[in-house]
Amino acid sequence: MNKMLNLMRKFTIIFICLLCMLPFVVLLILSLNTPKRVFYEGNMFIPDFYVMNYVEGWKKSNIGNAMVNSAIITIIALAIIIIISAMAGYTISRFNYKFNKIIFAILLSCMMIPGIINTVPLYTLMIDLNAINTLWGMALVCATNALPQGVFVFSGFIRTIPKEIEESAIIDGCSYFTSFWRIVFPLLKPSISAIVILNGFGIWNNYSQAVFFLQDSRKHNVPQALSVYFQQFAGAKWNLMAATAVIAIIPVIIAFLLFQKNLMKGLTDGALKG
Amino acid sequence: MEKNKIGLHTFMALPAFALFSVFFIYPLIKGIGMSLTDWDGMSKASFIGLDNFRQFFGDERAINNIRTTVLFALGSAPLLNLVGLIYALLMNSRFKGKGLARMIIYLPAIISPLIMGYIWYLLLQPGRGFIYHFLEQMGKSSWFGNWLGSYGTAMLVLILVNVWQYAGMTMVIYLAGLQAIPEELYEAAKVDGATFPKRLFYITLPMLMPAIRINVVTNIIGSLSVFDIVMSLTSGGPGYATETLSIYIMRMSYGARTGYSTAVAIIMFFIILIPVLVSMWLTRVKSLD
């Protein structure tokens, strides 16, 4: 009986995995077919291995430029989130100042407000700050969206670190500020990878706010560049569209493979304990 | 730890608070003011009181947007949690290839939902999509329908695609929660002869409450503010049938109705706030002794 159940469980998991991969496989097949091939004629699972789609998709779309933009935005935003929310998380979890409590309460209550709510007034602010169509402006917006969650995760994690760890450094004449950077910050790795995974891909893929703040096509990010390119062809050149989508997905998958080992650890140690 | 000694550590929360004030709280308050005007984004705005809100509730398209958004969330959020939990329970044991399976199931969640929408569009397109051809080769082309072309099936497709994409993310949070449950609890329950359903309802689910809370709240917020996937799969069509509130806000703002679009955003804020508060109250952690 137990063996049967185990076998059924295995088949279910395999089925779920296939379901998750199917669209990617179809995309890959489409991207490797020649433009002349009528959709899926013959054996639809064997493509023509025609790589010119990739060359043409790369040249005609704005995807290369957009990937650079997305990368810059993501790296700046993540750096800001990690540095300032780790700092805030430290003082909030270690010192009982009244304004620390107030700041934490404000951040937590704003955690459930999605970015789209204040996008329109934010747009007018961005114009005043000359931050429209700038990568730094978009990075600051993305960092702000993730800030409450960041402070929440870091303060929760720092609470689990014993205070004695810094205490000896304080006795040696170190300030709390320097001992945070030297001693506590290096211990935050699991929370940092949780933050990177939970927010990094969302920032890279941000579309709903990029539509407002990055209207200049030279500043387009990945989803925007793809959407412009796809709309140009309006369903006509599928193979090119598929190849461009594959190009756009590759860096994301590589980043995921690099970080996913820390994903579970980051979640169990960081996000859930908070 | 000695307190109240003022030093740099006293002010370490200030950078976060400053950034948040400028880019979040200030626009939020400014938006309330803007929602009471007829501002078009360029010329001088004049105060019109609650006219924008009146206009919203008198607009058939806007009311339909609320219905679509809420219907999407009602389908998507519970289903995501259920599927994610089932996946997690299936995956919560040691077996060969567990890491690989977990990675594959999480994979769709890292791809842009906009791209995901386009991919599913390529699969579902009538007459030449992958699914049509697959059914045709099997001799069952009559099973195929123009699912994106009518309201009911288009909504179903949107919900299923969203669940398909984010089930992995929900699963991973639940898996992390399951791993935090001490093994001794299950062993004690087994000794006492508790069956699987009993163990599920008396140990697993109560101990999983923090993970349930995170998942329920994020899924409610995510599905009520859905944007990308609708843009690429149906762009709100047919007509405005599957247009959601966040798309409506974007289109109104593009259409130089800045004041009105901020009013819509405030209405959307309350549509999100109420279910979030209710679910946070329902999933509050009772002290376990």
Image (tube, grey):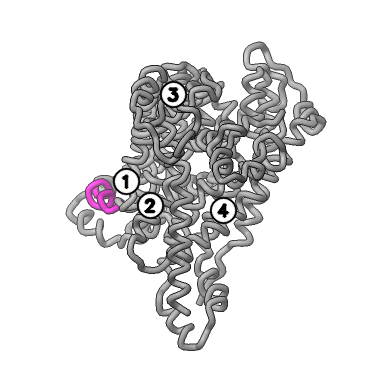
- Percent across and percent down for residue A52 are 34, 23
The residue that disc 4 covers is: B80
Give the amino acid at mark 1: Leu
Asked if the residues shown at circle 3 and circle 4 are in contact, with their CB atoms under 8 angstroms apart, the answer is no
Circle 3 residues within 10 Å: few <14, some 14–19, many ≥20: some
Query: Within the image, what quadrant is residue A82 found in?
Result: top left
Q: Viewed as shown, does residue B197 lie left or right of B93?
A: right
Q: CA distance from mark 1 to mark 3?
A: 32 Å
Q: Which mark is residue A63?
A: none
Residue tagged by mark 1?
A257
Toward the viewer: A169 or A35? A35
Badge 2 vs badge 1, beta-carbon distance below 8 Å: yes
Q: Which residues are magenta?
A: A179-188
The CA distance from mark 3 to mark 4 is 38 Å
- Asked if badge 1 and badge 3 are on a common chain, one would say yes
Please rate how many residues cluster around mark 1, counting C-alpha atoms within 10 Å: few if below 14, some from 14 to 19, many from 20.
few
Residue, x 57% and y 59% (percent of image)? B82
Q: Identity of the amino acid at label 3?
A: Pro
Label 2, label 1: how far apart the Cα atoms are: 8 Å
| Quarter occupied by residue A31 | top left
Query: Which quadrant is home to the N terminus of chain B?
Result: bottom left
User: Badge 3 is on which residue?
Assistant: A35
> Looking at the picture, how far across and down is residue B216, in whole percent?
57, 54
Residue corresponding to mark 2: B103
Instruction: Determine the chain carrying the residue at label 3.
Output: A
Check disc 4 and give the amino acid type.
Answer: Leu
Q: Residue furthest right?
A: B58
